[in-house]
Image: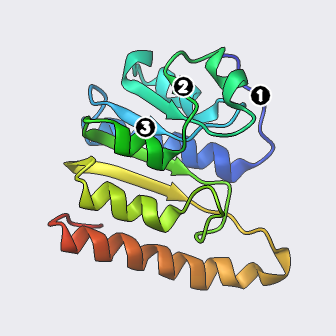
Amino acid sequence: YKIKESSNPDKITINKDYAQLILRNNLEKQYMVILESPALRTLHELKLIGIPDSKILVPNYTESFYQIKQKHNNTYNVTLTEFLKDTNLTFGSIFADYCSTLDGNSIFSPINDIKLIMNERKIKRCGIIAITISRRNTKKKNDLQNNDISRLNYYITKYARINGYNAV
């Protein structure tokens, strides 16, 4: 994959760490779902560790769909929610790199996706769910670090516990 250079060192680190988690947990032969941007950073890191294209599924319901689809055939023009509802697969990992706050918007809801993943058993027992969120209002910088991260942990732990998963 030809990737765009990222000036955000956090995004680079997150993608590298995610790929290493896949290896450490022996999930490289499992199907995985990722939310990807046109920069293709996550796909690039997964390819570097030997994950075949056929195992990486990319729902993308944005204007970037066609750009990503040109470079990765297993890209689908649906939201993560729609994709998960329409598949019978159980995944070794799901990387939901949301470009939104935890509350989402009128098209998708990270909280509802977490609930769906757990309630519908879309993740294998020893699988990995990685979720990133962002803030849109820079005046509330500490809110993301405190409130949103605490809420994210709350929802993951709540739905994991209800459905017999261990959240660590």
On the rendered image, what quadrant is the C terminus found in?
bottom left
User: Is mark 1 in CB contact (under 8 Å) with mark 3?
Assistant: no
Residue at the spot of label 3: 33
- The residue where tag 2 is placed is 75
Q: Mark 2 belongs to which amino acid?
A: Thr
Query: Callout 3 environment at 10 Å: few (<14), some (14 to 19), or many (20+)?
Result: many
Q: CA distance from mark 2 to mark 3?
A: 10 Å
Indicate left or right for 56 with 119 as reference: right
Colour mode of the rendering: rainbow
Q: Which residue is mark 1?
A: 4
| Amino acid under disc 3 | Val
CA–CA distance in space, label 2 to label 1: 18 Å
Q: Where does residue 100 sit, x and y in percent of width and height?
A: 67, 61
Quarter assignment of residue 64: top right
Which mark sits nearer the N-terminus, 2 or 3? 3
Image coords of residue 74 (percent x, y): 49, 21
Camera-nearest residue between 114 and 52: 114
Disc 1 to disc 3, how far (Cα)?
21 Å
Pointer 2 or 1: first along the chain: 1
Judged from the image, the secondary structure of the residue bearing numbered disc 3 is strand
**Picture residue at 54% right of the left edge, 76% below the top:** 149
Residue in front for this viewpoint, 43 or 156: 156
The residue located at (25%, 36%) in the rendering is 88
> Vertical placement of 25 versus 69: above or below?
below
User: Which element carries disc 1, helix, strand or loop?
Assistant: loop
